[in-house]
Image (cartoon, rainbow, N blue to C red):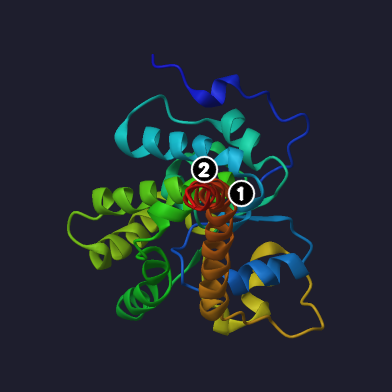
Amino acid sequence: MTSRLIDSKPPHPNPKPMQILILGMPRTGVSSLRAALNVLGYNTFHGSMLQNTPELYPYWEEAISAYHYDTAANYTHEDYDKLLGDYNVSCNMPGTYVWRDLVDAYPDAKIILTNRDPDRWMTSMKASVDEGIKWRSWDYVTPFEPTQRAWWRYQKFQQALRKHICPKGEREAFIDHYEAIRAYVPKDRLLEFDVKAGWTGLCDFLGKDVPDEGFPHVNDREGFMVARTQRWWKAFNAMVSTLLPPFAMGIAGALGWWFARF
């Protein structure tokens, strides 16, 4: 059996019991649902948080590769606890990529599916996720900043994966994903949730009291692109900081040599 990177990572000393797996696709109201679960007192993990722990990107890449490409043994409950042990909710990506692993690893966790009209989902993805990664300059600026370098490698991995898991196109893969989960997860463990529905159905499913405040509605498309732009500038500044001093020294040396001739 191929050795795995995760096997060298120590066990989590005190993992939280996983209570909720949000397995809907991105751009289906996950940010609003995550904000609502935070109000209810849950500790939620989302893939965007990996920017604070870039050393975890290779583990998720390994887990996803094992799941989709059979490169190693699939991750188990103990393996995922090493990555998710600080949280009791996993919010879509990267967990959605390995959804069956997580459903099996955490049999007591409730499953929530956020959904959306497939055509509107495709439009939203193209205007946000796809727009934010198509800048060709990522390849040139990210090598100069370790966090952005790890992030960009993971993004490129995801793009290749999307082509692998969508042989009939992303719209069909979107529909197939929801049908597969509905067929796999017992109905009493599954909630199909539209964030427009508000608190009541969600709180009934989770056994929670309805909060006094309104249900949060987070439209993160603009924030998503702002974050991508800020990430690019951080990498660009690192590139300039790395290249400018030797470049300046080279110019100064050339000028010194030129002036010395006269």
Q: Residue at x 60, y 50 (%)?
A: 50
| Amino acid type of the residue tagged 2 in the rendering | Leu
- From this view, report whether residue 95 is shown above or below residue 60: below
Residue 33, horizontal then vertical, whole percent: 61, 70
Q: Is residue 162 left or right of residue 38?
A: left
Residue at 34% of width from left, 61% of height from top?
136
Residue that label 1 marks: 109
**Residue at horizontal 37 percent and vertical 50 percent from the top:** 156
Contact (Cβ within 8 Å) of mark 2 with mark 1: yes
Is the N terminus in the top left, top right, bottom left or bottom right quadrant?
top left
Sequence order check, earlier mark of 2 and 1: 2
Whether residue 185 is visible to the viewer of this picture, yes or no, is: no
Residue 7 image offset from top left, x and y in percent: 56, 21
Above-or-below relation of 230 to 164: below
Q: Residue 38 or 162: which is nearer the viewer? A: 162
Residue 35 appears at what percent x and percent y? 68, 70
Residue lying furthest top in this view? 1
